[in-house]
Image (cartoon, rainbow, N blue to C red):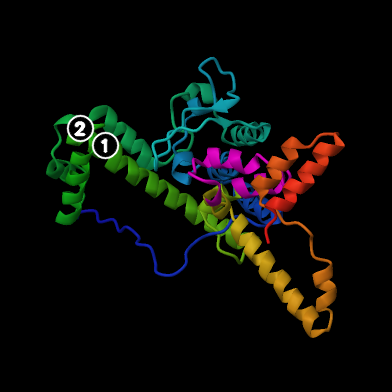
Amino acid sequence: MAQIRSYATKKKGKTEVQPFWNMSDIKNVVEWFEKNNEWDGYLITLLELLLGRRIGDTVMMRWSDLYYENGNRKSEIDTIEEQKTGKITNLPVSNMVWEAVDNYLSHVKINPMGHYDEYIFYYQPKTDWIHRGEFWHYKVFTLDFWCEKLDKDFSEKRKEKIVSDYKKQNKYETLGDYLYWEVEYNDIVKWQTDDYRKKLKKAIEYAGIQYRVSSHSLRKSFGYWIHKTHPFDPDCLLSLQKLFNHTDLQTTMNYIGLTEEKNRQLINDHGEFIHNVLAGKGDEIVKNMPVISLKSDDFGKIIRMLTDDVDKYQAAIDMANEMRII
């Protein structure tokens, strides 16, 4: 019987997920993987939190992304091409990455140098895919022959889209190569990430998390907690924008949850204000409001120009007054 795979469609309504707002939630999620000896899931989770890549890029990492051929550990990763964008981002590797890798290796008992060019995370369909690439002559494949070989029961509409997408690209000369490196590769990534998501869902239930989170929350948490732990660094958001390959700072702020967090804070503060108004304390609250409110990038400009010179300090204060948000 032909194999039929269903591809989920996005449900209507808001499906945007949030970062892991609480440190205890991160701890409990990682703890679930450790307690259940899910060591691939453990390392995937921590690499997501520590490197901030998309889940599909993480599950397809190789040992060669982390090590040099001589066995030395890399201090920077510059070999991960984003599946979604095709971009490569230089990623500094923290000591915590190596702590997680060492813990992983102590449990799975393998030597990375003996598997240098191999994928880190085992998945049987991925192994089968690699085997096909070594022994099948994809260059001569037609679409119908490929479907028959893999027992694919694709609709004519999907076949037409595959051929159309192949003709639009110029990376692969033959349809067979395109089928292997694009269609099959994307399917493998999807299936392996789906497998990880099922386990992550159990970890989330174990942690008792009630807000909307998913595997994408790990990438968002990478940015959220970097910013949270560097609140007065004027260049922090710029660095995150570059690490995420975003086009502007506002996109980064929205993505990592800062805008949502700010909105929640404003609404809560407003609720407290109305509470005090009803209690006859509204005037007192208004009197104690901050004199100056600045955008973070404007605040950064001021910090960079501060010196011990009194005149320049006063100039910075005047500049702050000009930039303040009314």
* Main SS category, magenta section: helix
Q: Please tell me which residue is depicted at 23% across the width and 39% down the height of the picture.
A: 179
| Label 2 Cα neighbours within 10 Å, binned few <14 / some 14-19 / many ≥20 | some
- Magenta-colored span: 222-250
CB-based contact (under 8 Å), mark 2 and mark 1? yes
Identity, as a three-letter code, of the amino acid under mark 1: Tyr
Q: Position of residue 31 (x, y in %)?
A: 66, 50
The quadrant where residue 288 appears: bottom right
Is residue 208 something that shows in the picture? no
Give the residue type at disc 2.
Answer: Tyr
Q: Which residue is mark 1?
A: 180
Q: Is residue 259 magenta?
A: no
Residue, disc 2: 138
Question: Residue at left 71%, top 75%?
Answer: 271
Compared across the picture, whether 160 is left or right of 10 comes to left
Q: Tell me what residue is drawn at x 53 percent, y 30 percent.
A: 90
Foreground pick, 145 / 16: 16
Q: Can residue 117 be seen in the rendering of this structure?
A: yes
Q: Quadrant of residue 42?
A: top right
In 3D space, how far apart are the residues under numbered discs 2 and 1 (Cα atoms)?
7 Å
Q: Which mark is residue 132?
A: none
Residue 237 falls within the magenta-colored stretch: yes
Local packing at callout 1 (Cα closer than 10 Å; few below 14, some 14-19, many 20+) is: some
Q: Residue at x 67, y 49 (%)?
A: 296
Note whether 255 is above or below 242 in the view shown. below
Residue 82: % across, % down: 43, 38
Q: Nearer the viewer, residue 185 or 166?
A: 166
Q: Secondary structure at mark 1?
A: helix
In the rendered view, does 23 fall on the left or right side of 164? right
